Image (spheres, helix red, strand yellow):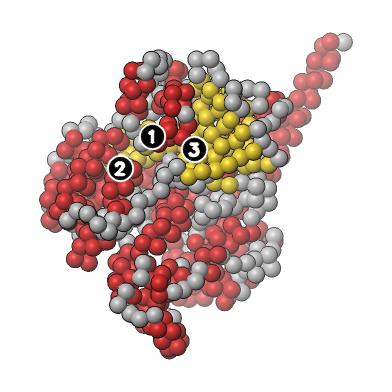
Amino acid sequence: MSGIAGLVGESNTSLAEDAVNKMVNALVRRGPDAEGVEVWSVAVLGHRQLSIYDLGDSGRQPLLSPDGDVGVVFDGAIYNFQDLRRDLISRGYEFKTNAHPEVLIHGYLEWGLDRLVARLKGMFSFALWDNCARRLFLVRDRLGVKPLLYSYHKGKLAFASTIRALRAGGFAQEIDEQALTEYLEFGFVTDERTIYQGIAKVPAATIVEWSNGSIRRREYWSTPAVSTSGFPAFEEAVDETERLLLNAVERCLQADVAIGALLRGGIDASLVCWAISKLGGDVKALTVGTADDPGGETAVARAVAEALKVDQRVIQLAADEMPDVSELVKAYGEPFACASSLGMLMVAKAVKESTTILLIGDGSDDVFLGYPEHLNFWRAERLARTLPASAATLWASVRSMFPDSGLLRRVRSFADYTTGGLGAAACVRDGLPMYSKNGLLGDRLARTRVTQRAMPWSIESARQLLSDFLVYDRRMRFVGEYMTKVDGATMYHAVEARSPFLDQDLWWFASTLPFDVRLKGGQLKAVLKEIVRRRIGEQFINEQESGFDIPVNRWIVDKWRDRVRETFNESYLAGEGWINSNAVLGILDLSIQRGEAPTQLWYLFVLELWLRSERDETTSNVQRYKQKYKMASKEREIRRAVSR
């Protein structure tokens, strides 16, 4: 794990190097162990390193080809590094390090960029500069586990691991109103936008190529469609999933530093620990709990560890230890209101003393179908296939008779899915309508909309709802929220998180499994639960992880109430015309009476703290620049006095 940055197309190397140094300095938490910058005539690459492999100086980046014409900066892990290394050695290439980026350099020279990327297995983002060809390649892994952003303007391209680094380098423009609207709808900014104009995210499974001042993007991989013929029976699917999971875990165990596995109460982490035990890995199971939770996830995790006979360490947090909302703002460069990220930040901080690499179970719900909406959408899809097209018209004529709250809201939503498909599913959240209904938005946002709510409703979409939703969700929530949550929280504390369920071979296979296999008997994650039943114990198949849930909706009106009120009494958002602070304070008062705040108030609170942090950082940067300028002026005066 690392932080990467760079700039190409700037002929003034002094300016370019200064900008890259600023970006590298902003990435220090992602890579606290070392830094490096390499300069060519029209390109500068920078790197911050978290040492995982080749812990000596030889593994430091940027890493260069023997002639210095090809350079690379890399973030992540290539799990088939050793296989590629052996292949390239057999072709005559000499390796001077055990660092993963050297495979990229020799592989690029042997196969070219596209054929190289097709061979890579792992999670990564990297930039490769070919000085002879005057080309830069930005590459992001297949599922978007590792972040990579860029700014392209007037033929120049700057890139970095975080938006905050690009901003430090001077490449961010004004806040993007549409991105801000997306945040208010979802609690995160999707991968299609960034919070600042002039900056874009490299999409998952995408190569961005810069050449002679022009750029082009191309996708190099896509998730396969669900198999409709020749698919395996349930037992065969379970056997193959087990084999692929063992292979995935084995790949994740490669490192030159201590590895831990996060063991919680759910089946995903339990399966990862089972695979480690099966493989004979020397890995400690880490459980993070609180002293006041003796019968919760900690107790289940202990039972799993005993069943697997694995070495476990329970890291106790103080019962009164509170998540730090200010840390949430610092860890994520864009406004990010995923409440469970507060818990993930606490876990990453707690395990840092024990491990540098943490194996986790993330991703299984998304591909093996573990969320309740997966089952609802599958049932709606099957029902829609039995209905005539006129059913949509009939439902539209009576829909207003069903309330949009209470128990009947579920009936109404299910009927929407059955006749409206993905368009209906995208509108089920309260989102922007709640802000508008309560007058919470200021003039700058009063007329904004999100495109996701404009998707058409149709019974044709309903007949393939779950398939459509999985494609949609991978571009939205999966990358924008789930992958962002884990990377931001763990890298803030210099911990590398690895999830075997994000292994591309396992993901590919699971994606092709028919829904009636993955949801056999109406059971979420049926395939994985069967492995748990076989290998760990029947009693563990229905255990659920809490997801690091933090009750922010209650804490806003309780533990954080005074801070929230004070914050919105002197609101930066209101001062810049984004919100109506009086209306927000009114919602806060109503929420205090009810004992719980709406999610949208939490989103606004995080956004307010984020904006304050950004504005304060700008002021600090200006002050630091002025101080640096004063010191430089004094040095010049001293030199002149000495020369006289």
* Residue type highlighted by circle 2: Asp
Taking 640 as reference, is 14 above or below it?
below
Q: Residue at 50% of width from left, 59% of height from top?
A: 187
- Residue 446 in view here: no
Residue positioned most to the top: 643
Residue 82 left/right relative to 330: left
Q: Which residue is mark 1?
A: 120
Q: First in sequence: mark 3 or mark 1?
A: 1
How far is disc 3 from disc 1 in space, using C-alphas? Answer: 11 Å
Look at the numbered discs 2 and 1 and tell me whether their residues touch, using CB distance below 8 Å.
Answer: no
Q: Residue at 32% of width from left, 61% of height from top?
A: 371
Taking 194 as reference, is 623 above or below it?
above
* Residue type highlighted by circle 3: Val
Q: Which residue is mark 2?
A: 505
Q: First in sequence: mark 3 or mark 2?
A: 3
What is the crowding at mark 3: few (fewer than 14 residues within 10 Å), some, or many (at least 20)?
many
Count the numbered circles shown: 3
* Residue type highlighted by circle 1: Leu
Q: Which residue is mark 3?
A: 139
